[in-house]
Image: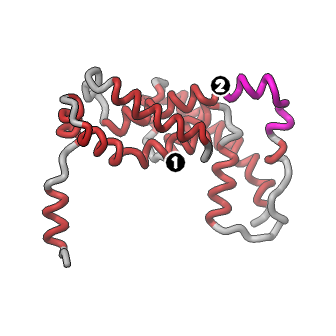
Amino acid sequence: MQGPTSERKRAEVQPTDEELLDGARRGDDSAFRQLVERYEGRVAATVIGMLGNTEEAEDAGQETFIRFYRSLDRFRGESSIATYLTRIAINQSLDAIKRRQRWTKRFVSRDEEEVMLTQPVHDAGEEIDARERAELVRTAIQTLKADHRSVVVLRMIEGYSTRETAEILGLPVGTVTSRLSRALDKLEAVLDPLVGEA
């Protein structure tokens, strides 16, 4: 049976991001795989927050790591790997949203697109559990415009500060603040009738 000491030793021998990055640049597939394993949860949270739990999100997540791999030699470490990957994931998600919007304009009316969010899913006073509430929030986030959605995902789901969010998106801090405020107002307007008085 392994105790705290063996766990500490195992933690001590974990390679740093920089060591894994150096290994990946030298063609060490194992090093790159460890980077993927280290950050796949963060990337998944970003793309699912932006696109929902969809095939699009899965594709965007895979494409994020493909692009990261192709850019290993260009990555100079001005930001952390986590921030760099999040930026790629956001850009991949925004591209997917644009493709979705082009398709939607061709085949689906706006009324049809929002029909699922025009009727309460719970009677007033009916209690909903935390999992249902989280699903409602995720669904409501999908109704936001892409530029507002990216701010909400980074600030409220990923936990980046306003300044970090601004850096990832390449926006002024004031723009992030105003987009977040408008996005939260929209979410409140969407969620209030959905949850009733629960």
Please say whether residue 112 is one of the residues in the magenta stretch. Answer: yes
Which of 73 and 91 lies nearest the eye of the viewer?
73
Q: Secondary structure at mark 1?
A: helix
* N-term-proximal mark, 2 vs 1: 2
- What residue do we see at 19% from left, 35% from top? 23
Left or right: 34 with respect to 162?
Answer: left
Q: Secondary structure at mark 2?
A: helix
Of circles 2 and 1, which is in front? 2
Residue 168 locus on image (x, y percent): 43, 30
Q: Is residue 180 visible?
A: no
Please say whether residue 168 is one of the residues in the magenta stretch. Answer: no
- What residue do we see at 26% from left, 22% from top? 73
* Residue type of the residue flagged with mark 1: Ile
Residue under label 1 = 157
Quarter placement of the C terminus: bottom right
Residue 159 locus on image (x, y percent): 45, 47
- What residue do we see at 67% from left, 41% from top? 142
Left or right: 123 with respect to 1?
Answer: right
Q: Which mark is residue 115?
A: none
Q: Residues within 10 Å of mark 1 (few under 14, many from 20)?
A: few
Looking at the rendering, which quadrant does residue 106 occupy?
top right
* Residue type of the residue flagged with mark 2: Arg
Residue under label 2 = 99
Quarter placement of the N terminus: bottom left
- What residue do we see at 79% from left, 47% from top? 117
Q: For the magenta stretch, what is the residue range?
A: 100-113
